[in-house]
Image (cartoon, rainbow, N blue to C red):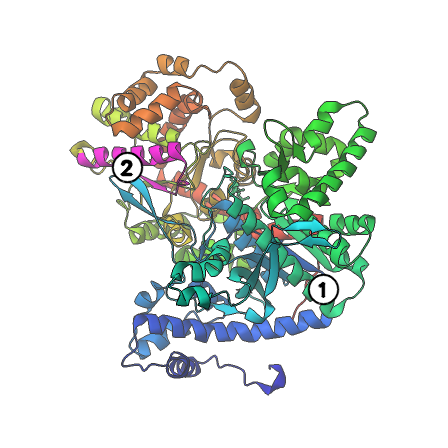
Amino acid sequence: DLRNGLRPLGSTPAEFEQDLLSNLYYRRGTTVESASAQDAYETLALTVRDRLAARRARTAAAHYETNPRWVYYLSAEYLLGPQLEQNLLYSGTTDLAPAALKALGFSPEEVEALDVEPGLGNGGLGRLAACLLDSLATLDIPAVGYGIRYDLGIFKQDFENGEQVEKPDDWTFQGDPWEFPAPDDWQTVGFYGYVGPEGWVPGEIVHGEPSHLLVPGYGTETVNIVRLWRARAAQASFDLRRFSAGQYAEAVQEAVKAENISKVLYPDDSTEMGRELRLKQQYFLVSCSLRDIIRRFRFRNSDWSDFPVKTVIQLNDTHPTLAIPELMRLLVDEEKLDWEQAWSLVRQTFAYTCHTLLPEALETWPVDMLGRLLPRHLEIIYRINAELLDEVRATFPDDLSRVRNLSLIQEEPQRRVRMANLAVTGTFKVNGVAELHSQLLTSTTFADFAALWPDKFTNVTNGVTPRRFVRLANPGLSALITEGLGSEDWLRDLSLLSGLAPLADDASFRARWRSEKRHAKSALGLGDPGAMLDVMIKRFHEYKRQQLKILHVITLYQRLQSAPGRFGVPRTVLFGGKAAPAYYAAKSIIKTINAVAAAVAADPKSSGLLRVVFPANYNVTLAEKIIPAADLSEQISMAGKEASGTGNMKLALNGALTIGTLDGANVEIRDRVGADNFFLFGLDAPAALSLRSGDYQPRSYYEADDELRAALDALSNGVFGGAGQEVAQSLLGRDEYLTLADYRSYIDKQDEVAAVWQNQERWTRMSILNTAGSGFFSSDRTVSDYLERIWRASPVRP
Ligand SMILES: CCc1ccc([C@H](C)CC(=O)N[C@@H]2O[C@H](CO)[C@@H](O)[C@H](O)[C@H]2O)cc1
């Protein structure tokens, strides 16, 4: 029962339908007769949201009462996925909704198709943030996610003549029924200006206006929130004087300038572009969020020494690292704490997760740009650096290289602030996202810091939410799992999946497992359901080696021509993923894939044997359709490059077998599902590193391998167009990610895959054992590890 005597919302079909009807009339302002599918969608969303809002109210009340320790997650990206099905499941209205819609003459399928996902992220980092929030709520942990409410999310991908073209993603064109605007919690953010005797005097002021989405827990009462900030002009900035003088553009330029800050998500996911607007976005996010966190702290607390007791703030990669100097500024300049006390509070409050190993992905900002945009913060960074280097000199006397490497300031070729060094220095814990990754961080990227502060470094292997990526995406397989295990408890304790292992020896269970997979494949409708569905779904990047997959396809195609006997088994190869718009090499690979797909499709010899499909605009919605249908999961990055991967986990959980290198979380997947149930190939990280840093001659592999030469020659001769030639050229040139070195091992392993596929009983057994062994990769386990090793927060049950 709600406080203040509010009538609880009904849960019978009649009561739900009644609520839907009254919302259609009173909140949507239309009638059943004249309502559109969009009206029905928005009304259904409000009706479901109300039920979650009731739980939210109870959760907020319980949090206020208990004054708990809070986990705040600061992330520039959240890939939340489509909200409707999730909120139906979490509000227990999955069956009520379609019945009520039908009763009012609406088609549930048509309505569900209008559930546009908020694409406020690029890939792994953004989706992980969403999975962690889901698990924090499911584990009843008081938590808030903070982010930016970009007007335009990740671009829509389309293909023109096989080339990727980007279209703006105006996701709120129809408004967003799931969000709660909270304009009265607005915050003020300053930029530019100077530091005077009385402190920083910003030259430009904007307002941050929040809205939040509900983050319900599964199988519990808790409903947390994710709060997203949008930029607004500080005061009514419409310049009437200019307007009446006909200077229309100037009249609104202040507002436009301000709103530009949260206009669009930067579509790069591994190369920093150093744009000033991106730096403004990062400061905007941390300034609004820290003020909101302090406002919430002050609800029940007044002593600053309690701040790190009640608050832990996780930095999702370096993008929100400015939070460290910003909290220093707030504590020293506004709250008048002394530097030492402030610095000790800051270092007890922040923790940092690193999601990459690529040097070009580690952000650095030009000192002059940062000094101009945030003059006071640069001063603070300099002081932090001075104290750091004193400690370094004391710990490693006369070791100039350490001083140079650890300094927050890169001196050559341009003076730049190293955000990763600042993140490590200003936090109490730093973690990688898979065991191999965390090891490589302490042995390479942060080796000097690990020598200085060995206890600061830990690992928390990524995970994914089984609610969205098994229960919602794959209801058929979920029902079979529930039947096999005897209950749905696995959805809140994924380690229970191990109970499926004995069923791998049960022929009838295998048959039903196989038919669920086949059903998912026909539902996807991309290729013959009888063929092996071989999927590579992830952002395009040369280290992920989509180029190696395309060499395999060309080899299979050439075998069709010259050695049909060696072709193997009918296979549909599915690619999905976007390339950063400025990433030319990745876009050449996309173009080449589409050219190869067209050539294969045009060749009658391929029919029924080989097909290449590349559905455009891969996102969470599409992932939920592809992952249940996949037989083979391609995780073929150069060892030592993929921090973890999370697609690998989603695919294994849905019974796909993995062909992969010993990279990122592949290592742990293989350990947990069993080496016999994993197709391992290629150089491991140490071998790859020594070959890469040694005298690697890609051409020697070309000369030594007939099939490799034939495939590369086809590319070089333009059989698959100019883009193919560029791909061949780079592989026969530097081949940065050892694609040619791993080719033969990969092709031979793929032949093994084909051989196993021919024994469907064996394949299905391995598939069941993959699911059974993947319980570890639940984001609930990931959050439990964060709680134990970093956050140390406790559940509050409303
Ligand atoms: C500055 C541009 C930029 C933007 C985003 C990023 C992200 C860190 C890239 C990313 O998404 N990394 C992925 O994070 C996943 C979640 O931890 C991992 O599973 C992937 O291996 C990693 O590539 C780096 C650089």
Q: Earlier along the polypeptide chain: callout 1 or callout 2?
A: 1
| Between 210 and 91, the one nearer to me in the picture | 210
Q: Which residue range is magenta in the image?
A: 573-602
Image quarter of residue 410? top right
Q: Is residue 428 above or below residue 605?
A: below
* Badge nearest the viewer, 1 or 2: 1
Q: Is residue 208 above or below residue 644?
A: below
Judged left or right of residue 147, residue 598 is: left
Does the image show residue 210? yes
Does the image show residue 487? no
- SS at mark 1 in the image: helix
- Residue appearing at x 55%, y 27% in the figure: 685
Q: From mark 1 to mark 2, how far is it between C-alphas?
A: 53 Å
Q: Which mark is residue 297?
A: 1
Picture coordinates of residue 727 (x, y %)? 35, 26
Judged left or right of residue 562, residue 136 is: right
Looking at the figure, which quarter contains the N terminus? bottom right
Picture coordinates of residue 247 (x, y %)? 39, 61
- SS at mark 2 in the image: helix
- Residue appearing at x 50%, y 45% in the figure: 124
User: Badge 2, how many Cα within 10 Å: few under 14, some, many 20+?
Assistant: many
Residue 95 in magenta? Answer: no
Q: Which residue is mark 2?
A: 594
Q: Are marks 1 and 2 in contact (CB under 8 Å)?
A: no
Picture coordinates of residue 480 (x, y %)? 43, 56
- Residue appearing at x 22%, y 36% in the figure: 598
Three-letter amino acid code of the residue under disc 1: Phe
Looking at the figure, which quarter contains the C terminus? bottom right
